[in-house]
Amino acid sequence: MSRTARRDGTPENNRSYAKARPQRGGQGAKNLNKRGKAAAGKPEKQQRKQRDSEILLSNARPAKRQHVAPRATNEQEQGELIRLQKVLAKAGVASRRHAEILIDAGRVEVNGKIIMEQGTRVNPNTDVIRVDGVRVNVNEKNQYFVLNKPRGLHSTMSDELGRPCIGDIISERIASGQRLFHVGRLDADTEGLLLLTNDGELANRLMHPKYEVSKTYLATVLGEADRALIKQLRDGIELDDGPAKADYVQIIDTYQGKSLIRVELHEGRKHIVRRMLKAAGYPVQALVRTKLHTVQLGEQKPGTIRALNDMELTSLYKAVDM
């Protein structure tokens, strides 16, 4: 009768063979090698350590890129430096592919140096980037707004006497963490265009007399003005703190003993327009700033703010050599 077969079809092992063969891990296997002979042997503790090291598997996941040079650990480089074509694409200059074409053509410069190497990394928070000589705003942290300041509002972010001020209009933006300040001032009785930004460099340059940034005002004055006033303002009027003159003067209308006059000048002395017109014999009844360089108030309603568009911002950059 045939021996009982296992499920896999192999005959059951011979008992005598099973007895003769030492069991793995049994008492007789400690000092035997693979041929059943006594091992010349290593100490038992050392053998156990070797077996454990062979069984232990690493749970570490292999990196996709095995041969990469170590990168610098500089925080600024890791956190802020971005590929130039990506910065240009994010700023809306062009797609990444087209930005690469601009770079290849030598039309992009960083901090005054033309960049033609693809993959160049820049810091959008500090580097000055230009395309075809025109500066591009790539710093998302910088914000630029135009406020139409109403009459009676003080040009401060907070007022110790509780009087209405600019900070009241942008209180929600301040509460959300935006740090804005006004560029220059308008007295409480003057309304009109006032820039708000957190770009300190641009603000300082716009106010610096070196750059002679023009400002345009509409003044309603007492008296019906004539061409003599235009010549007087253009030639210069002597004030308490020195002579002052306008760059451009236009009489828009005269009616019922009043005149509407447009005055353009680049000086920034306190109450300069009011003092000039008063010295000329035409005291100001109402004054509105309508324009700063090429940025215009337009139809913007008093007490509202809007963001500068790219063309306006680029124009201001050019005016102050940024």
Image (tube, rainbow, N blue to C red):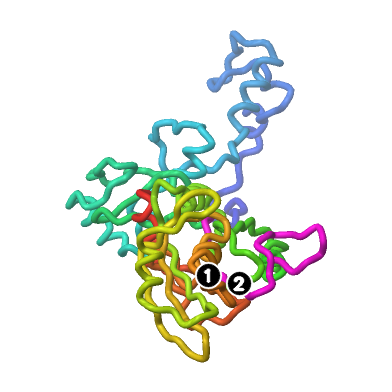
In front: 102, or 145?
145
Indicate which disc residue 155 carries: none
Q: Residue at x 57, y 70 (%)?
A: 147
Rounded to the nearest angstrom, the CA distance separating label 1 from label 2 is 6 Å
Find residue 233 and report its horizontal and vertical position in percent.
Answer: 40, 65
Indicate which disc residue 193 carries: 1
Residue 288 seen anywhere in this rendered image of the structure = yes
Q: Main secondary structure of the magenta part?
A: loop
Q: Secondary structure at mark 1?
A: strand
Q: Is residue 170 magenta?
A: no
Answer left or right for 267 relative to 182.
Answer: left
For the record, the magenta segment spans: 141-165
Find residue 222 and report its horizontal and vertical position in percent.
Answer: 54, 79
Q: CB atoms at circles 1 and 2 under 8 Å apart?
A: yes
Indicate which disc residue 149 carries: 2
Could you say which quadrant of the image residue 165 lies in? bottom right
Q: Amino acid at mark 1?
A: Leu
Q: Secondary structure at mark 2?
A: strand
In the rendered view, tell whether residue 105 sits above or below residue 66: below
Find residue 271 and report its horizontal and vertical position in percent.
Answer: 57, 61
In the rendered view, tell whether residue 28 sits above or below residue 161: above
Residue 9 seen anywhere in this rendered image of the structure = no
In front: 88, or 72?
88
Residue furthest out toward the bottom: 256
User: Circle 1: is it few (<14), some (14-19), or many (20+) Cα within 10 Å?
Assistant: many
Q: Residue at x 58, y 77 (%)?
A: 286
Answer left or right for 261 relative to 39.
Answer: left
Q: Amino acid at mark 2?
A: Lys
